[in-house]
Image (spheres, rainbow, N blue to C red):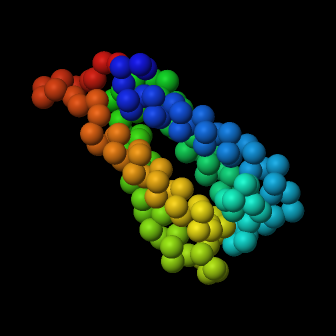
């Protein structure tokens, strides 16, 4: 893992997203599953669906990070691209009935920042030499 930036980032982000997903359930008691106004976890809004998404993303990242650089690179890039989309769409969803994961402004900033890091590392690190099917970490 020391030699692979993708494995390191996937492992760290995975652990953090899992922790946030678990902690989110401590503040969302009584909040509707698809509530557009969630409970605050520090400054971030969450609802039960948002917590489940954090758990799924965290599990995928942690699994990839604990496996190999090739998988970590793919998962970091994919999650980064999805978070870029969520960050941009979130700018339009806050305050609307379509905001089923209870996004707020702080969530949007964090999703965009996560996208920059995950995409940046996923697309720029652990280059696979031409002709090699797997990168070794």
Position in image of residue 25 (x %, y %): 78, 50
Residue 97 relative to residue 13: left or right: right
Position in image of residue 105 (x %, y %): 59, 68
Nearer the observer, 84 or 33: 84
Residue 120 relative to residue 29: left or right: left
- Residue 63 seen anywhere in this rendered image of the structure: yes
Nearer the observer, 52 or 81: 81
Q: Could you tell me which residue is drawn at 53 percent across and 33 percent down?
A: 12
Position in image of residue 122 (x %, y %): 34, 40
- Residue 82 seen anywhere in this rendered image of the structure: no
Quick check: 109 above or below 56? below
Quick check: 41 above or below 96? above
Q: Could you tell me which residue is drawn at 62 percent across and 68 percent down?
A: 104
Position in image of residue 134 (x %, y %): 27, 24
Q: Could you tell me which residue is drawn at 41 percent across and 46 percent down?
A: 117
Q: Could you tell me which residue is drawn at 30 percent across and 18 percent down?
A: 136
């Amino acid at each position: 893992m020391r030699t692979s930036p993708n494995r390191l980032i996937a492992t760290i982000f995975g652990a953090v997203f899992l922790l946030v997903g678990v902690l989110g359930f401590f503040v969302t008691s009584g909040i509707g599953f698809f509530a557009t106004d969630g409970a605050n976890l520090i400054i971030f809004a969450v609802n039960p669906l948002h917590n489940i998404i954090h758990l799924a993303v965290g599990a995928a990242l942690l699994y990839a990070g604990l496996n190999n650089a090739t998988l970590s690179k793919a998962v970091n890039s994919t999650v980064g691209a999805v978070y870029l989309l969520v960050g941009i769409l979130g700018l339009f969803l806050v305050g609307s009935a379509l905001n089923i994961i209870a996004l707020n402004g702080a969530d949007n900033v964090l999703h965009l920042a996560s996208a920059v890091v995950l995409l940046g590392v996923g697309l720029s690190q652990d280059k696979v030499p031409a002709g090699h099917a797997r990168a070794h970490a």
